[in-house]
Image (cartoon, helix red, strand yellow):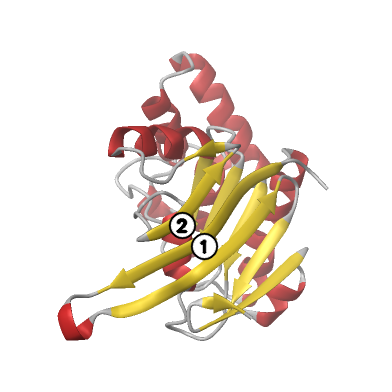
Amino acid sequence: MGDLALRCTGLQRYLGEGEGRVHVLKGVSFEARRGQVYAIVGPSGCGKSTLLYLLGLLDQPDGGEIEINGQRMSNTDDLARTAARGEHIGFVFQFHFLMLEFTALENVMMPMRKLGRLTVPAMEARARSLLDSVGLGAKTHRLGTQLSGGEQQRVAVARALANQPSIILADEPTGNLDVKNSALVFDLLTRLAKDNGQAVILVTHNPEIAQRCDVTRPMRDGLFV
């Protein structure tokens, strides 16, 4: 088992106001190790995506703790959370959120530009090698609009890996792809993450994909069951 990349304990989250206030997460605890792929499964509305947003520091819990690489992240300010997100976390969503008016290469370079650690030639070289690794080496200069859905999602995988994060969070990453592309994107994501010693946490409705993960955690009504 690899090192612990992420741990959360007793996460609580309420959404809505007044009488419409819903207790979405009811004390969720979870840990993820490097080199392992975790599936979080369960019916719609059970809290899977809410949990993923908290783990990705996109949202604050109402109670409980989140640690990333041993660093406590709950109750830190927005600046610290944004910095930690850029450094430690890669995201792949169902809708790839590419900047379609930019090329594949530019999309993969964006997180690197934000982190600002590498020179531009080094960023370009890394982006090219990532696009090679997802089978798009020949399409680096294609605009997002000139790529198929499966190709766009592969660019999103390359982009998620850009800053060598220790954690990849994926929300239904194959949700709007056909069977062949689903398998391809899943294989790429898991193979590259294992090669790089990254923890992958994915939310999925797809039982075949969940079965192929190292650990499956079923969720119901705001708790793991």
> Residue 193: where, in percent of width, then height?
69, 46
On the question of residue 137 being in view, the answer is: no
- Residue in view at x 16 percent, y 80 percent: 18
- Mark 2 nearby-residue class (10 Å; few <14, some 14–19, many ≥20): some
Element under label 1?
A: strand
Locate residue 213 relative to residue 203 in the image: left or right: right
- Residue in view at x 47 percent, y 81 percent: 46
Instruction: Note whether 1 is above or below 19 in the view shown.
Output: above
Q: Quadrant of residue 107?
A: top left
Dots 1 and 2: beta carbons under 8 Å? yes
Instruction: Note whether 16 is above or below 65 in the view shown.
Output: below
Q: In front: 87, or 114?
A: 87
Q: Quadrant of residue 78?
A: top left
Locate residue 45 relative to residue 2 in the image: left or right: left
Locate residue 37 relative to residue 71 in the image: left or right: right
Amino acid beneath label 2: Gly
> Residue 6: where, in percent of width, then height?
60, 47
On the question of residue 50 being in view, the answer is: yes
Instruction: Note whether 19 is above or below 63 in the view shown.
Output: below
Q: In front: 195, or 58?
A: 58
Instruction: Note whether 69 is above or below 191 in the view shown.
Output: above
> Residue 27: where, in percent of width, then height?
50, 69
Amino acid beneath label 1: Gly
Specify the farthest residue to the right: 1
> Residue 98: where, in percent of width, then height?
38, 50
Specify the farthest residue to the left: 18
Q: Which residue is mark 1?
A: 10
Q: On residue 64, which mark appears?
A: 2
Give me the C-alpha separation between circle 1 and circle 2: 5 Å
- Residue in view at x 28 percent, y 72 percent: 15
